Image (tube, helix red, strand yellow):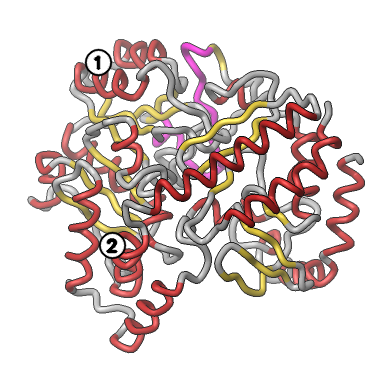
Amino acid sequence: MTSTDVLRRWVERSRKSQELHAKAKKLLPLGVESHYRAIDPNPIFIERAQGSRIWDADGNEYLDFGLCFGALFVGHAHPKILEAVNAQMKEGSMYTMPHRHDIDLAENLLSRFPMDLVRFTNSGTEATMHAIRTARGYTKRNKIIKFEGGFHGCHDYVLASTKPDLKEIGEPSAPNLVPGSLGIPEETLNNTLIAGFNNLESVERLFKKYPGQIAAVISEPVMMNTGVCLPQDDFLQKLLDVCHQNGALLILDEVKTGAKIAWGGACETYKLKPDLICLAKTIGGGLPLGAFGGKKEVMSVLENFSVSHVGTYNGNPLCIKAGAVTCRDILTKDVYPKTQALNKRLMSGYADIMKKNRLPWHMAEIGPIGTVHFTPEQVRDYRTWAQTNKEIWKRYWFGMCNEGIIPTPYGWDEQWTISVQHTQADIDRHLAVFEKIAPTLVP
């Protein structure tokens, strides 16, 4: 079966979605609310979701392992969150003044992560934007380092070299900056520097080239704009040490890992104490919520009003209460071994099926997260991930969806998530479908 065959079946299964998409295109650019939802040949329009399942406008049911780019570690429409949100709506959805739920969620986050103080935002993009501003205000420096292939939201500070063309990227030890969008001033990008993930030499080179000018390095602990790209050889601790040796801060972007790969996120997994931490996705339980926090000394620039952080929707009680219930009542320490065991079962099943079909592809996992890299070698940075066989990936993703399994979010850079509402039966169904389509994935 070719990619053309699986796409033809996708189209046949999504006639009503296509009708809705045609209407939406007259109202919204590309007919979607985010570029990442612009699926080719057409997106499916969702009617409802519950637990580990979603249903589209054509009545197709799917087991969902994409879970909103991994944001829904709690699964869809968790009963405890529904109860909390419905109760809060009766008491008001916005105050723009403090409330007790702020304290409940802040106490939980400070117990999980090595932070002294935390502030709430509305998204991961806002969290990284404010963390960078805080780092600049504290160090009184302007430049930041981010990693090639890393994604930290869609603001101007970091929308660079997220998916750069291989013809433009330069040498591994000295990557070129490639803008991620038109509309970003050159003056802004002049303060953004690019290094290679798992390449400490490229970081050290930048500190030598710009002495006393770099405020911070921002990094995901596991780069997840490239599947699952794990840090190697104690890279994260060495990175933190290099930052401190040069008077800079480390901002750990735990938007995709925080409260998910472990109770204390990557800080727990890798025993890290970064200067600033960014959170979002999982902590909101399905509502828009982000946070950034860190050492009291660093966060002091907010306490003395020298760095500004404001927002009408910041800390609204609806989202904060959902976050508090998520972190306190749902994502308790006992759920992590369960979701990780289910992921081990899925990974092991994939490995057996791939071996049986002599598929040359690679896999990577952490916590309840995993993926197949359709690459000739294991992914260790953006450049190894960029060798992805996209035609094979199409057969995989659309083929799985056509059988009722959304294996990951749309995109060969994505990964699956096992939620607290997935069951062993869900895993076994996923594996049965993968076994069915695996013979089509031979290069």
Amino acid type, mark 1: Pro
Front residue of this view, candidates 117 and 113: 113
- Residue at 86% over, 59% down: 11
In terms of image quadrants, where is residue 4? top right
- Residue name at image x 41 percent, y 50 percent: 125
Q: Which residue is mark 1?
A: 211
Residue 90 rendering spot, x and y as whole percentages: 33, 89
Q: Name the magenta segment's main secondary structure.
A: loop
Q: Residue 405's quadrant in the figure? A: bottom right
Looking at the picture, does residue 411 appear above or below residue 377?
below
The secondary element bearing badge 1 is classed as loop
Specify whether residue 365 is in view.
Answer: yes
Residues drawn in magenta: 172-190
The amino acid beneath tag 2 is Arg
Tell me where residue 128 sits by quadrant.
top left
Q: Decide if residue 25 is on the left or right side of residue 443.
A: left
How far separated are the C-alphas under marks 1 and 2?
A: 43 Å
SS for callout 2? helix
Q: Residues within 10 Å of mark 2 (few under 14, many from 20)?
A: some
x and y, in percent, of residue 137 in the image: 19, 39
Q: Quadrant of the N terminus?
A: top right
* Mark sitting on residue 328: 2
Instruction: List x then y, in percent, for residue 368.
Output: 49, 45
Q: Which quadrant holds the C terminus?
A: top right
Residue 164 tag number? none
Residue at point 56% right, 25% down?
382
| As drawn, 129 above or below 422 | above
Closer mark to the observer between disc 1 and disc 2: 2
Q: Residue furthest bottom?
A: 90
Q: Is residue 183 magenta?
A: yes
Where 394 falls versus 95 (above or below)? above
> Within the magenta stretch, is there residue 136?
no
